[in-house]
Amino acid sequence: MNALSAPDNLTAATPARSRERRQSVQAADTVVAVLKGLAGLGGGASLTTLAAHLDENPAKVHRYLVSLIDGGLVTQNANTQQYTLGLESMLIGLAAMRQADPIRIAEPALIHLREHLGITSFIAVMGNKGPTIVRMEEPSLPVTVNVRVGSVLSFLWSATGRVFLGLHDEPAVRALARQEFDTLGETQDPPAPFDTLVTQLQDEISRFECVCVRDTNLKGISAVAAPVFNYAGQLTAVLTALGASGGFDTSLNGPIAVCVRQQAQLISQQLGYNIA
Amino acid sequence: MNALSAPDNLTAATPARSRERRQSVQAADTVVAVLKGLAGLGGGASLTTLAAHLDENPAKVHRYLVSLIDGGLVTQNANTQQYTLGLESMLIGLAAMRQADPIRIAEPALIHLREHLGITSFIAVMGNKGPTIVRMEEPSLPVTVNVRVGSVLSFLWSATGRVFLGLHDEPAVRALARQEFDTLGETQDPPAPFDTLVTQLQDEISRFECVCVRDTNLKGISAVAAPVFNYAGQLTAVLTALGASGGFDTSLNGPIAVCVRQQAQLISQQLGYNIA
């Protein structure tokens, strides 16, 4: 190792040295382009196709492919001569997925909702007791509707919970929701039979990409919730905006629903959903 | 192709040019090392930690990180200053996963079994009718036990099918197996009640990492089958060796079972299983 290192600190940057640096940056950019090029071509391509895609000299592309093969990021198929992304690329991707934290990635969306619409919003994930608020932003207004981080929300009555009820099909999660349903008791009528409710919600979310409620969870409070998906297409979080029903537009094409949907889609994209 | 070909075709390779080439190869190697280093550190690290891990000068590592950030492969967290693998790394990994074809990757294992043990082996995946043979290798002996690519195997009586029955828990697959079970009719007794059978197989596979059968599927034929898992830990294929019961050792510590298990694990590793 140490191709260009220690001298960097010891000697002043001569023109020759700064040319070397420029070259190493160009080389790094080319490696990035080759990897992204292979990914863009579905993970594998011939040298000719890849070089044409990158608008680069095949000999130059080949030189970089050799380094990538040495490093295990690319393999060459002995039969087809195609270059394909290899095991190390997969492991790098898996490490990137572990880093792709929906809570951290959702932060700009919460701030966007606060700054552009002046509303309270939060991100919820599935905890072991149900849909759980993990991050919240509220506008700095004299009176705001507020939620508490750590709160577990109803599957049946909250917009957030309804998204989880419709789309989170793990048996353990369904069992939690069913438990809430079965203990409704005499005080409250269920919105529909359990399985009907799930089907209705699935239909609603696939058509409108969000769930809106008015006064169902708390009297006087309305909310719009939209699903956040990960690279595998699994529901990984729910983004929700809420406010006092009087001044809160829950119509499907109103500014709040449009913005919540857009921001949820942006988070999903950042988590690798549906782009590739 | 040749590392020293094109732009390069036009000018004679001067010492300066060949030094440039060496530098670009070194730069490519460093980019690969930085990406693998970040993955090895769980997907994110501070500059100091990463440079120490790579045994490189931090200033040099930083220069490469800048290229990777420009390309979207790495992001820097504004709060913690940590460098983490980003969205483009995830997309490269997803493309690598799509390329990670268990059938292609299993080919050397089938050849290994043929060459080292002189036995017939095949790889099966879950088709829409059940466990289906998709690739086969047989030794060039005068008499061999043979299988046909495209054949669908029994969930209940074949070693291959039993691995799928134990580990493939998709409802559609279980339904196919149940259908076979329910139509056994009066001619054959089931090996056990359905749910007991599934539990027994799960237990057997988790303890021995393979399933051995003698004469259950076809009189006079024995087989050893081992599961192949993908990066997500899902059963993605089954590797099976088979032969005439007379000369085929199905003992759990015999050379065939040991070799089939080892080869199945090698394929799984190549598919990104359990390494990261």
Image (tube, coloured by chain):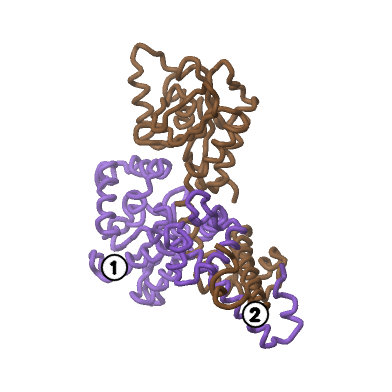
Chain colours: A purple, B brown
Q: Nearer the viewer, mark 2 or mark 1?
A: 2
- Residue A4: image location, x then y, percent: 70, 75
Q: Say which amino acid is labelled 2.
A: Glu
| Image location of residue A110, percent across then percent down | 41, 69
Q: Quadrant of the C terminus of chain A?
A: bottom left
What residue sits 69% from the left and 87% below the top?
A: A14
User: Which residue is painted at 72% across and 70% down in the image?
Assistant: A2
Q: Please give the residue where the numbered disc 2 appears in the rendered image.
A: A20
Q: Earlier in the sequence, mark 2 or mark 1?
A: 2
The residue that mark 1 highlights is A258
Q: Circles 2 and 1: CB distance less than 8 Å?
A: no
Q: Residues within 10 Å of mark 2 (few under 14, many from 20)?
A: some
Rendered location of residue B192, percent (x, y): 45, 18
The chain ID associated with circle 1 is A
| Residue B164 visible from this viewpoint | yes
**In the foreground, A109 or B182:** B182
SS under mark 1? helix
Please state if A73 lies on the left or on the right of B152 as rendered. right
Q: Is residue A194 left or right of residue B12?
A: left
Q: Amino acid at mark 1?
A: Val
Marks 2 and 1 sit apart, C-alpha to C-alpha, by 50 Å
Which quarter of the figure is the N terminus of chain A placed in? Answer: bottom right
Tell how many labels.
Answer: 2
Chain under numbered label 2: A
Residue B274 in the image: above or below residue B158: below
Which image quadrant for residue B22?
Answer: bottom right
Q: Residue furthest top?
A: B187
